[in-house]
Amino acid sequence: MALATIRPQAPRPAERARKPASFEAKLAGLIAETAAPGWDDEDGQAIPAACWGVVRELAMMVQSRWPDLPEPHPSAGGDGSRHLRWSCGGNLFDIEITEDGRALWARRIGQKYDSGLAGSQAELLDRLEETFS
């Protein structure tokens, strides 16, 4: 009597490992989600798709300069602000682009926190580099 061949079964959908969404996929979801007023089920201001361009450009600039840094996590605030957060080695770096275009930064290096208003894109990049170097 021959033994039956055992074939592995494909994993059920719930058992498949989920691959984290890429930055571009997360950003595309945010652009669609924040396009209309009240997107946050409260009084969230609509964020026009064009306003997300600076977020994409900044993330791409960081990725090209520091390719080993994990992709940032994009998010939005109900006040119309756009955010990027990088996390690596226990340190965090956040950028908030306000509705009027100012760039605020906050970071945690170990147990030390500090924050400020960036005077330029170069300053943002310098602060980010200090955070993860």
Image (tube, helix red, strand yellow):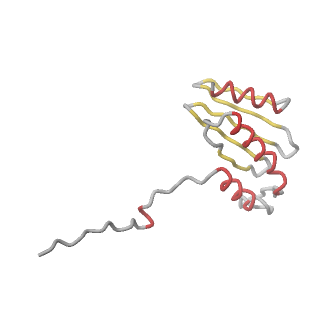
Instruction: Please tell me whether residue 26 is drawn above or below residue 86 in the rendered image.
Output: below
The quarter of the image holding the C terminus is: top right
Name the residue rendered at 81%, 55% in the picture. Answer: 47
Name the residue rendered at 68%, 53% in the picture. Answer: 24
Residue 85 % position (x, y): 67, 40
Residue 27 % position (x, y): 70, 53
Name the residue rendered at 60%, 30% in the picture. Answer: 91
Nearest the viewer among 11 and 77 is 11
Instruction: Please tell me whether residue 119 is drawn above or below residue 39 in the rendered image.
Output: above
Name the residue rendered at 24%, 70% in the picture. Answer: 5
Instruction: Please tell me whether residue 38 is drawn above or below residue 116 in the rendered image.
Output: below
User: Is residue 42 shown left or right of residue 98?
Assistant: left
User: Is residue 117 shown left or right of residue 22?
Assistant: right
Nearest the viewer among 5 and 65 is 5
Res 131 quadrant in image: top right
Residue 11 % position (x, y): 39, 65
Residue 116 % position (x, y): 77, 29
Res 111 quadrant in image: top right
Q: Residue furthest left?
A: 1
Q: Residue furthest bottom?
A: 1
User: Is residue 115 shown left or right of residue 15?
Assistant: right
Count of numbered tags = 0
Q: Residue furthest front?
A: 2
The quarter of the image holding the N terminus is: bottom left
Instruction: Please tell me whether residue 90 is drawn above or below residue 40 in the rendered image.
Output: above
User: Is residue 72 shown left or right of residue 97?
Assistant: left
Q: Residue furthest right?
A: 100
